[in-house]
Image (spheres, rainbow, N blue to C red):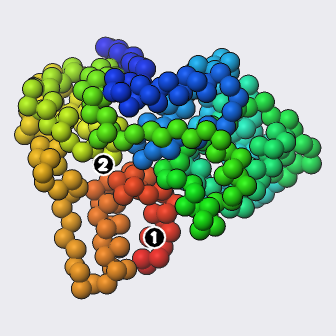
Amino acid sequence: MSRRPAAVVLAPVMRSAAMRKVDALLQAVAAREVAVTLLGESGTGKEVLARRIHERSERRRGPFVPINCAAIPEALFESELFGHERGAFTGATERARGKVEAAAGGTLFLDEIGEMPVAMQAKLLRFLEHRRFMRVGGTTKLLADVRMLFATLRPLERDVATGRFRADLYYRIGGIAIAVPPLRERRADVLPLLDQFVRQLSAQHGTPPPRFGRQARAALVNHAWPGNVRELRNLVELLCLTRGGKVVRPVDLPAAVRDPTGPRTSTLTVDLDAGLAAIVEQVLGAALALEGGHRGRAAHRLGISVRTLERRLAGAR
């Protein structure tokens, strides 16, 4: 039986001037236990950069634990973060550690912090101020030795103004904000990322790497990449599976990539007489259909969080 080659893990691509500036900021903050928030569109690689901070810090030998705030149901958020005691709630048959304890001695990365429920924001603020927490159902305060990093899709000032995000928490975590540019603003990174993903994903899937012709590579550089690095990675993964060992031509690329002047998303016919609610329902349904019903991927396609997608789906019913 042949053995599949091990997946290749490579460092973040920092070829463009924009990303070299970001990397210099990451280096400057890595060794200091300061609050850092990464601000950037979905798919720009904020988790990769947070891990880079961790790996350059004094905590690099400890764990790096990411948590996506948009993916956790509100009722389970406190237990997910701080853990729970046996019998704390229905189904809690055993004591469970939360992400704070799992990250002890290392770094806890809270992605999409703007999607954290407001009630939970108050508890996070108390934890950041005192570095102590209690498991759900517990009576003992525990001391946490963990560094916190944060990321958000949009400037949190807007959510503070609308009351969706606590001002005191914003000022507590907003000491150093690093903007992560979208891929369309760092085109010099496209081909290095392409080559990295080809090596990584062909090894992961055990397929011969596809070879990209000159015209195909030019089309990739010229594409606007609304889904950013994640969109590029997903495309490369598809091509590793369908064009492994073959030359990738422009005809093998999605229409939106082949023609930069054409539509950037899949065609969707909208009935303008249907009313706004019906149009929203059409858009949500189209995104879910394109992603095979996967809500996480549909949310990324639309540039919203999973929680926002679910709220809008509920409102469309």
Q: Secondary structure at mark 2?
A: loop
Task: Give residue 225's position: percent from left, percent from top.
Answer: 27, 44
Q: Residue at the location (21% across, 57% down)?
A: 266
Residue 295 showing in the rendered view? no
Task: Give residue 38's position: percent from left, percent from top.
Answer: 53, 40
Specify the amino acid type for callout 2: Pro
Q: Nearer the viewer, residue 317 or 178?
A: 178
The quarter holding residue 204 reads: top left
Q: Residue at the location (33% across, 27% down)?
A: 16
Count of marks placed on residues:
2
Q: Nearer the viewer, residue 125 or 85?
A: 125
- Reading the image, the residue beneath label 2 is 226
- Reading the image, the residue beneath label 1 is 312
Task: Give residue 68's position: percent from left, percent from top.
Answer: 56, 46
Specify the amino acid type for callout 1: Arg
Q: Secondary structure at mark 1?
A: helix
Q: Is residue 261 left or right of residue 40?
A: left
